[in-house]
Image (cartoon, rainbow, N blue to C red):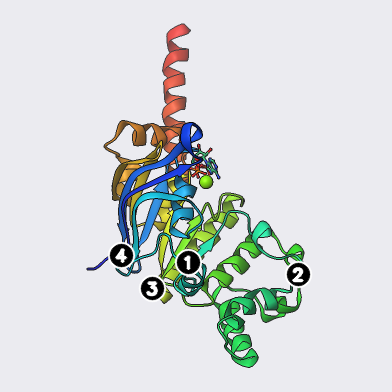
């Protein structure tokens, strides 16, 4: 199958000359239509930079980024705006990315109206999107500050979806949410992908999160990909020592596994107590 997105030997440097910092150093990966590729790695490893490079928001030094076979790094402003039909983004903090002075209805209609579609058609599309993210139509007249973090993330997802993109860059989209809300938003991402066939580049520092939503996972370390492969395999039995370190550092979210770990720990303690008695 031809890739939807193809990144080849991508290098991103921030700053120039002696101050230059290489944030991405020869990244290559691809994403198939309808696929979710997870991107994990410690803070500063370059995950957001890769997302930004795809969105045209990071300075590409060399290498290529192709979307449906077309080079998209270094696009002019106009072509970039056209590409927004196909490539969208959801950030960690929806509050920062939703205009607090606009109603939800206007926030969702705006990306449509810029394409020249009429107000009535835009409104019916907005209603359809709200339904998809499980928000009632009544939210249209309200403002971002009136919603919880999880609801705001639903709004941000609806906005990303409204133009029917093929790829969404999701940068830590559930990291600011409590665990229960995380789980429902992750399920929403999975459901939307199943229904629309959209692909995700899903950035997270949490292996449990990417395991839940991603088909494949790439592990980044200091601007490079050290391992990429099947999501279950990379998150449960990684090959690279750095990925294994990430795995051991992550808390066990699965309650059954957590109970087993705890039971194992208690059994160890009993043996120890018996020995000192
Ligand atoms: N605009 C910038 N100018 C200079 N350096 C930057 C810039 N943005 C990021 N960096 C540096 O590039 C490196 C990668 O940053 P990036 O934000 O991609 O990491 P990350 O993996 O997303 O981390 P986190 O998990 O904390 O979000 C870091 O060392 C960071 O300090
Ligand atoms: Mg980041």
The x and y percentages for residue 226 are 31, 39
Q: Is residue 266 above or below residue 160?
A: above
Q: Earlier in the sequence, mark 3 or mark 2?
A: 2
Tell me whether the residue at label 4 lies in contact with that at label 2, contact meaning CB atoms closer than 8 angstroms. Answer: no
Q: Mark 3, residues whose alpha carbon is within 10 Å: few (<14), some, or many (≥20)?
A: some
Tell me whether the residue at label 3 lies in contact with that at label 1, contact meaning CB atoms closer than 8 angstroms. Answer: no
Find disc 3 in the rendering and name its residue: 197
Q: Earlier in the sequence, mark 4 or mark 1?
A: 4
Tell me whether the residue at label 4 lies in contact with that at label 3, contact meaning CB atoms closer than 8 angstroms. Answer: no
The x and y percentages for residue 143 are 75, 69
Q: Earlier in the sequence, mark 3 or mark 1?
A: 1
Q: Earlier in the sequence, mark 2 or mark 1?
A: 1
Find disc 2 in the rendering and name its residue: 143
Q: Mark 4, residues whose alpha carbon is within 10 Å: few (<14), some, or many (≥20)?
A: some
Tell me whether the residue at label 4 lies in contact with that at label 1, contact meaning CB atoms closer than 8 angstroms. Answer: no
Find disc 4 in the rendering and name its residue: 32
Look at discs 3 and 1 and give the one toward the viewer.
Answer: 1
């Amino acid at each position: 199958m031809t890739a939807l997105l193809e990144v080849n030997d991508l290098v991103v440097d921030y700053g120039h000359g002696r101050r230059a910092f290489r944030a991405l150093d020869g990244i290559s990966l691809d994403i198939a239509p309808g696929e979710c590729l997870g991107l994990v790695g410690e803070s500063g490893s370059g995950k957001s930079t890769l997302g930004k490079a795809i969105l045209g928001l990071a300075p590409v030094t060399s290498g290529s980024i192709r979307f449906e076979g077309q080079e998209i790094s270094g696009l002019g402003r106009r072509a970039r705006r056209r590409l927004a039909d196909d490539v969208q983004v959801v950030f960690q903090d929806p509050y920062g990315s939703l205009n607090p002075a606009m109603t939800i209805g206007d926030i969702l209609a705006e990306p449509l109206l810029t394409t020249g579609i009429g107000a009535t058609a835009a409104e019916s599309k907005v209603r359809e999107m709200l339904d998809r993210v499980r928000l009632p139509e009544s939210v249209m007249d309200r403002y971002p500050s009136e919603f919880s973090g999880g609801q705001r993330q639903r709004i941000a997802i609806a906005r990303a979806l409204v133009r029917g993109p093929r790829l969404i860059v999701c940068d830590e989209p559930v990291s600011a949410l409590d665990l229960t809300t995380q789980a429902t938003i992750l399920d929403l991402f999975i459901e939307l992908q199943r229904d629309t066939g959209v692909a995700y580049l899903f950035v997270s520092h949490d292996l449990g999160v990417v395991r839940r939503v991603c088909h494949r996972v790439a592990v980044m370390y200091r601007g490079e990909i050290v391992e990429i492969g099947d999501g279950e395999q990379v998150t449960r039995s990684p090959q690279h020592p750095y990925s294994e370190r990430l795995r051991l550092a992550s808390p066990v979210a699965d309650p059954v596994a957590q109970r087993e770990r705890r039971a194992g720990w208690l059994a160890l303690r009993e043996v120890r107590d018996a020995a000192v008695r």
